[in-house]
Image (cartoon, rainbow, N blue to C red):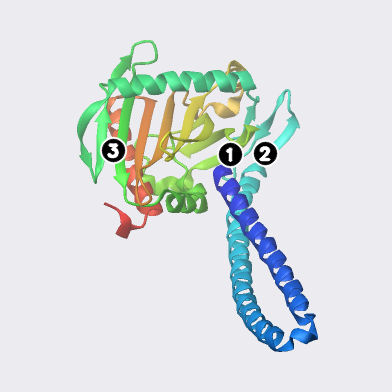
Amino acid sequence: MVAFRQNKKTKQKLLKDEHRRLEREMKLFLEKLRAVAAQNSSDRDTGDKTMIESVRELVAERETLRRENIALREEIIRHEKFREVVLGARKAFTENEKSTLLPIDIQSGWRVHFDSDVPSFHFHPFTRNEFDSGMKQFSMELERNASSVSLVGNFLGWNVHRAPLITSLSNNNSVLSRVQLSKRVHCPLDAFLRLSYAKEKDLSPTIITPIEFSIHERYKVSTQFLQEFDQDSLVFVHNIPGRDEILRYFYFVRRAQRQLQDGRRKLALSMMIADSSSNKHSRESDELQNNIEWATEGGMSVSLTEVDETSIDIVCDRWADCHSKVHAEYMLIQWAQFANWWEQTVAPSSLLL
């Protein structure tokens, strides 16, 4: 979103600068016209001929400038309207998410309430150090994920890589599932991002869900904005209703964009399940949390790399701590389904390879 705003501001500044330049040129042409009109009358024949030609040229140039001026104004208006639509949608989403928070004291935290009739909880804010340490751990986990997966098949054009399941004997025999999905999509990066921003709320992915939770039940997921360290470093919480209990987790979000040496752009979105000792202690002493499970391990990374003006490479790494092998298999299927659904929603079907 930051890159998008900066790009729009740059374009608008260039258009306005060009507008001012053309106006200056028009003033110079008018001064030239006055100078021609004031030529010495003794050279009237030659002067009249020169003046007529100059006036003819000036009229033609002025008409060209007038058309360019109109086109520039129309382009500026289109950019302003598009910018207002995008920023308005994002502002509405952010205000809606923030409106359900009840701040009491930033040091002690506040009570977080959801729209639906589900228990609230007391939230203790994360520190910047906790956020940075968590994202550092995320990077290590991402490297581990990339080195441990191998190709197992193809799902609707997505290459599916997977790591062997790991059972944790110290954590109620939970199973760690790691998956990587990749695909080249025939769609310009800017068009892909434009649609993603417009549908940001509906396309926000989940890191883990209860077993038997369908991607078609995405509308049941409640997302709450909790903190902002900077415009690309955020904290949220997910509340996901399950068959027997509610699943919740805090997660850090970090967005980044960089330019490769050959000029192509690469964007990355990182999401990592997070927790802290103060929030854990708060849950343990809160009777309202008895029917709620809090996930504490999992993450997702999505990278978009510009191939050329017409296509992008998408790589999505996911991992989560699942209850069982059945749950892990279920998450694999759901992650692949979500990737395909996300692609179909954002990229026009006629542009897909």
Total numbered circles: 3
Quadrant location of residue 99?
Answer: top right
Judge whether residue 284 can be spotted in this image.
no
Give the CA distance from mark 3 to mark 2: 34 Å
Q: Is residue 104 above or below residue 193?
A: above
Q: Which residue is painted at 38% across and 50% down in the image?
A: 309
In which image quadrant can residue 224 be found? top right
Q: Position of residue 250 (x, y in %)?
A: 54, 29
Which of the numbered marks, if any, corresponds to residue 333?
3
| Left or right side of 175 for 56 | right
Amino acid tagged 2: Leu
Separation of residues labelled 2 and 1 (CA atoms) = 8 Å
The label shown at residue 101 is 2
Residue sitting at x 64%, y 33%: 230
Seen from the viewer's position, the closer of residues 219 and 272 is 272
**Kind of residue indicated by mark 3:** Ile
Element on which disc 2 rests: strand
